Image: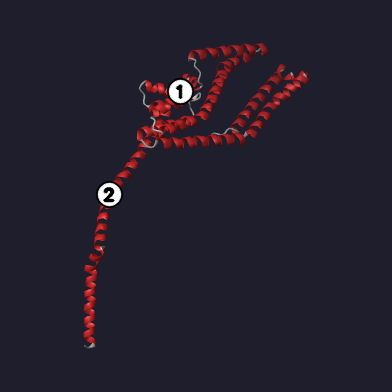
């Protein structure tokens, strides 16, 4: 057999082996079945793509619903910016009526007016007591009581949220958790959650009842809680996880507030010393040399100087208070 015949036989064997490898070998090793299975899985995955798109649409719709809920809450809060006297009394936690508060303000105005007239024997100065005693002093006392109550609420409120988180994770309904807080928590959180329970008894939903809390407690904490409950009631979701995040944020805010208070304590002490120094010096001078300093209130020029100094001191104290007050 010559070389040419051997080459032809070799080419024929290679061709047969190639055909066998291409058409028969895949069926013997299972590669054809694997490719067929892979094609089926791919086609099924392609068929599930609309489901993924639907999930994207659902997520977009959920975000839109949350945004609409936030916008609605902001509009309601904007409509309720005008605070009535009854609302301010409720924020202070006082159980008095509008008439009693006005009567008390009138009594304070009369007492301050008579006191100033007895000291100065001046009718214009005594008339200033009407403004001081009738408007300034009652509003100052009401604001002081309100701020003290808001501070107590901010300290106790994260603990109340933790009670709701544990109750929800244990399987209790949100309404039962609110009743537990209304019965066992400290004031003023207990009275606020009791009003939520009473509002639900009258037929309001939990979201509508909680929405009224920021009106009585005008703090970011109460507003955050009302937003979380409203969004969860409308959009659903994991309430325990949302309240856990809210509790962590509130505690971090309190830590930051305490840290700022500690850092600014030196500045506050300096402001108090600077503001009290002229009064203390004037009192000491009056005790040692009354004839020397009494010119400030027995002469017209002295009264003008005293009024200007009081106005400048008041302005300086106001500016210092704004410089050391931080909104967190």
Element at badge 2? loop
Give x and y (percent) for residue 168: 41, 33
Question: Could you tell me if residue 212 is visible in this image?
Answer: no
Q: What residue does disc 2 label?
A: 48
Nearest-to-viewer mark from 2 and 1? 1
Colour setup of the view: secondary structure
Q: Residues within 10 Å of mark 1 (few under 14, many from 20)?
A: few
Number of numbered discs visible in the structure rendering: 2
Depicted 99 relative to depicted 242: above or below: above
Foreground residue, 241 or 103?
241
Give x and y (percent) for residue 171: 39, 32
Foreground residue, 84 or 249?
249
Q: Residue furthest bottom?
A: 2
Foreground residue, 22 or 231?
22
Q: Is residue 120 left or right of residue 217?
A: right
Question: Residue 127: which quarter of the image?
Answer: top right
Give x and y (percent) for residue 272: 66, 29
Residue appearing at x 32%, y 41% in the figure: 58
Give x and y (percent) for residue 147: 54, 25
Question: Could you tell me if residue 62 is visible in this image?
Answer: yes
Q: Residues within 10 Å of mark 2 (few under 14, many from 20)?
A: few
Residue appearing at x 26%, y 60% in the figure: 34
Q: Is residue 67 left or right of residue 114?
A: left
Q: Give the CA separation, mark 2 to mark 1.
A: 51 Å
Element at badge 1? helix
Foreground residue, 146 or 306?
146
Q: What residue does disc 1 label?
A: 183
């Amino acid at each position: 057999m010559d070389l040419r015949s051997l080459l032809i036989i070799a080419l024929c064997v290679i061709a047969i082996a190639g055909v066998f490898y291409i058409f028969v070998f895949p069926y013997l090793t299972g590669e054809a079945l694997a490719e067929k299975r892979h094609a089926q899985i791919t086609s099924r995955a392609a068929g599930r793509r609309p489901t993924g798109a639907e999930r994207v649409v659902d997520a977009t719709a959920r975000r839109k619903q949350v945004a609409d809920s936030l916008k609605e809450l902001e509009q309601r809060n904007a409509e309720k910016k005008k605070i009535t006297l009854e609302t301010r009394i409720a924020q202070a936690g006082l159980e008095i009526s509008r008439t009693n508060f006005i009567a008390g303000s009138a009594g304070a105005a009369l007492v301050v007016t008579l006191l100033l007239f007895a000291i100065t024997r001046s009718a214009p100065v005594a008339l200033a007591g009407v403004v001081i005693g009738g408007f300034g002093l009652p509003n100052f006392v009401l604001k002081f009581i309100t701020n003290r109550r808001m501070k107590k609420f901010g300290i106790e409120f994260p603990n109340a949220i933790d009670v709701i988180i544990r109750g929800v994770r244990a399987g209790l309904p949100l309404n039962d958790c609110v009743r537990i807080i209304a019965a066992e928590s400290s004031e003023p959180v207990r009275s606020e959650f009791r009003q939520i329970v009473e509002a639900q008894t009258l037929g309001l939903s939990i979201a509508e009842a909680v929405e009224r809390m920021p009106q009585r407690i005008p703090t970011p904490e109460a507003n955050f809680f009302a937003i979380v409950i409203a969004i969860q009631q409308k959009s659903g979701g994991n309430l325990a996880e949302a309240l856990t995040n809210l509790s962590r944020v509130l505690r971090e805010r309190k830590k930051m507030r305490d840290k700022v208070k500690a850092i600014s304590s030196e500045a506050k002490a300096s402001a108090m010393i600077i503001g009290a120094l002229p009064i203390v010096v004037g009192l000491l001078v009056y005790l040692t040399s009354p004839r020397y300093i009494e010119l400030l209130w027995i002469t017209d020029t002295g009264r003008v100087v005293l009024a200007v100094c009081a106005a400048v001191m008041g302005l300086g104290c106001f500016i210092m208070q704004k410089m050391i007050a931080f909104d967190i």
